[in-house]
Image: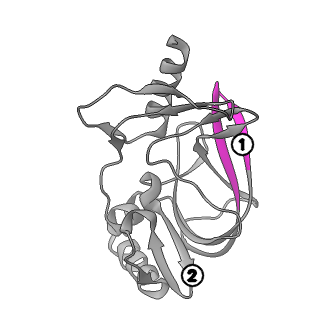
Amino acid sequence: MLKPLVIAVVVGAVAGGLWCMPGPAPQVQRSTGIGYDRIGAARCGAPTKTTVDLARDAVLIVRAHVLTERAVRASGLIWSEWELDVTETWKGDLPDPPLLVREPGGKIGHVEMRVSAGVRYRVGDEVVAFIVKDALGQWRTAGMTQGQWRVADGRAMRATDRGRSTSVAALRRAVQITNEEGR
């Protein structure tokens, strides 16, 4: 029982930028009938960031298609890793392909690890991603779910925006203005 709880606490720390509201402690829930453990970090989330905040924080901002997803074990945790096919670079220097974005959480075999407010990319989606490099040298999404915008029909929407979208052109212009002001 102690080991899963320790994993849940470590996952929260690794996710970075988390704060927790008073409430129940993180707990491990045994799923019924499907044979894996779910780890939840109760009532935690990332501080709200504006597009300007995200653009300032990001080392790399790209428009890309999500090509592949895989789960890997590293440092005793499960991570999901997505390969992005970059079509436009709005900020930063693109590393040698492929661009791999890694986030805590995922499923390997019968074991699944979930992170509250964790970022999930979907294979086939077009996205605008605000990306930072973590202390381990991994590319991560800035501001957790706030740093990923899904693109469809020339419009971009964050998962946190609950139905509100903006044109990709307006989002790109906001990033350009922020980049120009930061010079």
Quarter holding residue 78: top right
- In the rendered image, the quadrant that contains the C terminus is bottom left
Q: Classify 10 Å Cα crowding around label 1: few (below 14), some (14-19), many (20 and above).
A: some
* Residue 156 percent coordinates (x, y): 48, 78
Rendered position, 105 above or below 55: above
- Reading the image, the residue beneath label 2 is 152
Rendered position, 49 above or below 180: above
Rendered position, 11 above or below 98: above
Q: Is residue 57 left or right of residue 29?
A: left
Quarter holding residue 154: bottom right
Residue at horizontal 45 percent and vertical 64 percent from the top: 159
Nearer to us in this view, 54 or 145:
145
Quarter holding residue 76: top right
* Residue 11 percent coordinates (x, y): 50, 31
Q: Secondary structure at mark 2?
A: strand
Question: Magenta stretch?
Answer: 70-83
Nearer to us in this view, 148 or 3:
3
Q: Residue furthest left?
A: 22
- Reading the image, the residue beneath label 1 is 71
Nearer to us in this view, 159 or 72:
159
Residue at horizontal 47 percent and vertical 87 percent from the top: 169
